[in-house]
Amino acid sequence: MTALTHDLDRTDESVPLSQRLREGTRPEHEQAESSGFVERLMSGQLDVAAYADLAAQQWAIYGALEDASAAVRADAQGATLVFDELTRTPEIEKDLTFLVGADWAERITIHPATERYVARLREVGTSLPAYAAHAYTRYLGDLSGGQIIKRMMERHYGLSGDGLAFYTFVEIPKSKPFKDVYRERLDALVLTPEQLDETVAEAKHAFRLNSDLFADLGAVHR
């Protein structure tokens, strides 16, 4: 066990929350990224329909997350983590209109793992520690690995602006400075040791929910 892991296990409050989240979720993060569905999609082995199916699942998830954002914004600390420029639901709807058609809402399928993910967000999302965990997992991922997905969709499936609005942050031209600010906001949250543990545990759970989602997608798109 490394010294850092030991500190994390002991809830050392001197370790910034952003660092605790990064280190504490590393195994779950790597597992989600290495799923068969993600690897096949990124390497061009699937088709645009598989990407559209992923977008449909994201629509359900971000709808629940951004409902939580609206509730959390009423809390002084929670409001520091809510950025309008991160809102993704309208962008996903644009993508689905392009990828599936104007009647996408009647044509998409929400998979069981997505339903469980949404239920979890509905259950705990308005709690500040849980919200911080899920927002960190989703939004910082979109601004990091999500940009790689965008490039692979352009390269392998011929997509450009249309269909990739989800990964295009018009109001965030440079992601690194924004991510730095976001991490600073996370680190500035005043949380008890128990809440710090809760935040890391919920982020680990969020990555596992993502892995389950990718497993469902992988079973459909071979």
Image: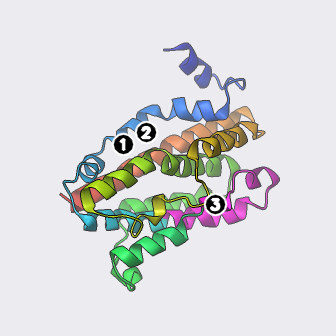
Spatial CA distance of label 1 from label 3 is 25 Å
Residue at (58, 24) in percent of width and height: 9
Which quarter of the figure is the C terminus placed in?
bottom left
Residue located beneath label 2 in the image: 29
Residue at (66, 26) in percent of width and height: 11
The range drawn in magenta is: 61-86
Given the image, on which type of amino acid does mark 2 rest? His
Q: Which secondary structure is most common in the magenta stretch?
A: helix
Spatial CA distance of label 2 from label 1 is 6 Å
Pointers 2 and 1 in contact (C-beta within 8 Å): yes
**Residue 81 in magenta stretch:** yes
76 displayed left or right of 95: right
Q: Is residue 217 above or below residue 129?
A: below
Residue 210 image offset from top left, x and y in percent: 41, 51
Given the image, on which type of amino acid does mark 1 rest? Glu
- Structural crowding at the residue carrying mark 1, measured as other residues with C-alpha within 10 Å and reported as few (<14), some (14–19) or many (≥20): some
161 displayed left or right of 47: right
Residue located beneath label 1 in the image: 33
SS for dot 2: helix
Q: Is residue 146 above or below residue 105?
A: above
Residue located beneath label 3 in the image: 85
SS for dot 3: helix
In this rendered view, identify the residue nearer to me: 212 or 81. Answer: 81
In this rendering, the count of numbered labels is 3
- Structural crowding at the residue carrying mark 2, measured as other residues with C-alpha within 10 Å and reported as few (<14), some (14–19) or many (≥20): many
